[in-house]
Image (cartoon, helix red, strand yellow):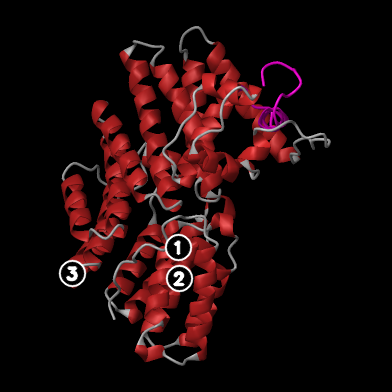
Amino acid sequence: MAELSLPRTRLEQRIQAANLNVHEFTVRFGEAAESTGEKVAVSERQAKRWFAGAAALPRAGARRVLESWLCESVGVLFGPPSTDVEPGPTMTGEEMIMTAGRESVEHAIGSASAIDPSALEQLHAEAQRAARAYYFAPPLAMLADLVRLRNTVYEQLDRTAKPRQKAELYLIAGQVCGLLSSVSWDLGYPDVADEQARAAHTYGSVIDHPSLQAWARALQVTVTFWSGRPRRATSIASTALDTAPAGTARARLHSVNARALALVGAHQEVAAELAAAAEELDRAGDDPFLDEIGGELGFDRSRRALCAGASFVALGNGEQAEIESTAALALFGQMPERVRWEAGELGARVDLSAARVLRGDLAGAENALQPVLDLAPERRTEALSRRLVNLGRVLGTRQFRGAVEANRMGEAIEEFTALCPSRSVSHPALPTSE
C-alpha cells in the first residue's frame, strides 16, 4: 500500500506484504481473473473499500479470483489481519536485479514530462527482451510482465501527438500483443489468442508494417488450425502470403499453412508449402523486425522442421514424420540453451513419438516421449498438451490394445494433462489420420 498504516483486513495485510499499491492490486486482480477465465474486474475505489473492510463480500466471480490468486478463503481475506508474523518476500539475487531494473525503467518513463528517445529505447528494449524470453520462460510468468508492458505503451500513446513517436509505440504495442497471443494460446485461451493476434495485425496495418502484419497472421493461422478450423487457417495464410515480405515472414506462413493443409489431408500441397518455406529461409536473415529481434518473432530451420514433422504426423506418414522430427531435434540441439525454444523442442519429441507409433515402434515412441513427460507443470503448454492428447487417442485404438508400452504412455499422458496449467486440454482434440 502507499502508506505504512496498520492493515485493517487480512486482504490488506496480504497486499502490504506483497508491496503492492492500490493500482498494482487492480492490475494483478485483472491478470488473475484472465488466467482463471473470470470476466470480472475491480476499480481502485472498490479495492480501497475491500482493504478497509467497508464493503460487502464480493460476488461469486470476484470471490473465485481472490481465492485462486491468494490461496485463502474470502471469509479469511475479508476478516481481521493475521496475528502471525508475515514472512517477507524472498528473492534470489537474479530476481532482485531484474526487479530493480524493471522498476528503474518504469520510474524513468513515468517521470518524463514528454516522450523522449530514451523512453522509447527502453520500451523497445523491454519488448525485445520479452520476445527472446518467450523461448524459455513459463507462459504464466510472462503474462503479467507483458500486460504491464502493453499498458505502459498505451499510457505513452496518450502522451504524445507526434506521428513518428506514435508509429514506434504502435510497433511496440503490436509486438507485445503478438507475444500475448502466443502466451494466451500456451495457457489454453484460443479465443483470446486470436483477439491478440488480430490486434497485432491492426497495429501493423495502422503503421503499414508488412513484417508485423505477416507475423500476426501466422500467429492467427496457428490458433485457427489448432481450434479445429484448418480450412479457415489456410485461407488466412494464403491471403497473408500475398503481401508478406520475402524471407522469414513468408517461411513462417508457408510452414503453418502446411500444418493446416495436413489436417485436411492435402498431401501434395503440404509438400509444396514445406518446400517453399525452405526456399524462403535461404533468403532470410535481414528482416530488421523479425530477424534482428528474434525469439518468438524469429523463424528458422528448426521451426520449419518442427512444422514439417507435425504435418506428416497429421497425414499419417510415420516414416517422413520421423525424418523431419529427428531433424528438428538435431537443429534445436545445436543451439545454446538461452536461445533454444524449449516448448518447440519438446513438441518435436512428441511428434517423433507419434511418428514411431505410426510405424509400430512403441518402445522407441516411449523413449522419445520421456523428457516431455518429465516437464514441470508450470512449463507445460497448450500445444504440447494437444499433441499428447492426440497421441493418446492413437495409442487407445484397437491396434495397440493390450500393449504394455501403449498403456504406460496413455496413463502418463493423462497425468501430464491433468497437471497442465492450460484450461482447455480437455477440449476435443483435432482428428488424427490413422
Side (left or right) of 115 relative to 245 = right
Identify the residue at the far bottom of this view. 402
Callout 1: helix, strand or loop? helix
14 left or right of 375 in image:
right
Comparing marks 3 and 1, which lies closer to the viewer?
Answer: 1
Q: Which residue is label 1 attached to? A: 384
Q: Where on the picture, by quarter, is residue 102?
A: top right
Q: Is residue 7 magenta?
A: yes
Answer yes or no: do the residues labelled 3 and 1 have beta carbons within 8 Å?
A: no
Tell me which secondary structure the magenta stretch mostly adopts: loop
Precedes in sequence: disc 3 or disc 1: 3
Identify the disc placed on residue 413: none
Question: Which three-letter amino acid code belongs to the residue tagged 1?
Answer: Leu
183, 267: nearer the viewer: 183
Residue of label 3: 266
Q: In which quadrant of the rendered view does residue 105 lie? A: top right
Region in magenta: 1-21
Residue 127 rendering spot, x and y as whole percentages: 47, 33
Spatial CA span between label 3 and label 1: 24 Å
**Amino acid at dot 2:** Val
Q: Amino acid at mark 3?
A: Ala
Disc 3 secondary structure class: loop
For label 2, the crowd category at 10 Å Cα-Cα, with few meaning under 14, some 14 to 19 and many 20 or more, is many
Q: Specify the quadrant that holds the C terminus.
A: bottom left
Residue 52 in picture, x, y percent from top left: 65, 22
Tag 2 secondary structure = helix
Residue indicated by mark 2: 350
> Can residue 41 be spotted in the picture?
yes
| Structural distance between the alpha carbons of marks 2 and 3 | 22 Å
Q: Is residue 374 above or below residue 112?
A: below
